Image: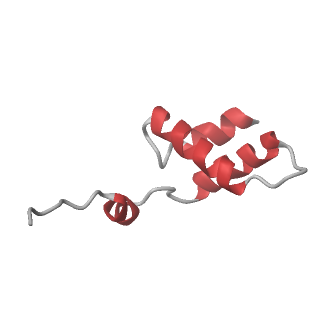
Amino acid sequence: MRSDLIFGALTHVTNRYKLCQLASKATRKLHKPNTRLQDTTNEVLDRFKDTVPMSEQVEADLAIPSRRAA
């Protein structure tokens, strides 16, 4: 059931809002034509359950670099 997948994914992403944002972005990127969107969402949540979707290193890479005055 999807609720089991969500609770499994919450072990790595403690913020439910962030989990929804990450899951929707991942679902958009991983979705293949002619497949059900529900199956893609379940696959994404299953992947989140097994791995950490946003590690500290990825968050550091996404940080906005500070600009210096010329």
The structure residue drawn at horizontal position 47% and vertical position 33%, both measured from the top left corner, is: 17
Residue 58 vs 24, above or below: the answer is: below
The structure residue drawn at horizontal position 46% and vertical position 39%, both measured from the top left corner, is: 18
Q: Quadrant of residue 5?
A: top right
**Count of all numbered marks drawn on residues in the image:** 0
Q: Quadrant of the N terminus?
A: top right
User: Is 2 left or right of 21, judged from the image as shown?
Assistant: right
Q: Quadrant of the C terminus?
A: bottom left
User: Is 12 left or right of 24, judged from the image as shown?
Assistant: left
Query: Which residue is the extreme one toward the front?
Result: 70
Return the residue nearer the eye: 40 or 66.
66
Residue 62: % across, % down: 36, 59
The structure residue drawn at horizontal position 60% and vertical position 58%, both measured from the top left corner, is: 50
Return the residue nearer the eye: 6 or 57.
57
Return the residue nearer the eye: 15 or 28.
28
Residue 56 vs 48, above or below: the answer is: below
How is the model colour-coded?
secondary structure
Residue 63: % across, % down: 30, 58
Residue 30 vs 42, above or below: the answer is: below
The structure residue drawn at horizontal position 43% and vertical position 36%, both measured from the top left corner, is: 15
User: Is 28 left or right of 65, judged from the image as shown?
Assistant: right
Q: Quadrant of residue 3?
A: top right
Residue 24: % across, % down: 61, 42
Residue 7: % across, % down: 59, 38
